Image: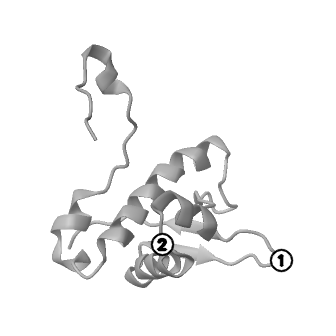
Amino acid sequence: MKFRYFYGSSADQYSFIRIPKLLITDNQFSELTIQAKLLYGLLLDRMAMSIKNKWIDNQNRVYVIYPITEIQNDMHITKKKAMECLAELAQKGLVEKQIRGSGMPNLLYIKQFVAA
């Protein structure tokens, strides 16, 4: 496949997922898979939607709603792999899941971190 060059303002056409550099470079995150790190970036990106939708709990904490099926579709991975990536982030303390039950999607609290 032959790709085209960027010309002028066409360079602005992409949106980007930001992944904190420390997730890549700091030893405390070295055991996280690249897919889990990418998922963290996607979750951070979802925070903008959360703010827009006023998804803030009674303790003023912002939460994300990102069902496993959407993670699967966005990352082109299996349900099992999506759940594994989310579990990796939860085990590391980067994501906290609040289960709501009754067919409602879980709430995901994305945690800030500072390298030690």
Which of the 4 image quarters holds residue 26? bottom left
> Which residue shows up at 63% across the image and 61% down it?
65
Percent across and percent down for residue 115 are 22, 69
How many numbered tags mark residues here?
Answer: 2
Percent across and percent down for residue 79 are 56, 76
Percent across and percent down for residue 19 are 31, 56
Return the mark for residue 95.
2
Q: Is residue 6 left or right of residue 47?
A: left
Return the mark for residue 77.
none
Q: CA distance from mark 2 to mark 1?
A: 22 Å
Q: Is residue 67 visible?
A: no
Type of the residue with mark 2: Val
Q: Assess disc 2: are there few (<14), some (14-19) or many (≥20) residues with their C-alpha within 10 Å of its C-alpha.
A: some
Asked if the residues shown at circle 2 and circle 1 are in contact, with their CB atoms under 8 angstroms apart, the answer is no
Q: Is residue 114 visible?
A: yes
Secondary structure, mark 1, is loop
Q: Is residue 61 above or below residue 105?
A: above
Q: Nearer the viewer, residue 8 or 66?
A: 8
> Which residue shows up at 31% across the image and 76% down it?
33
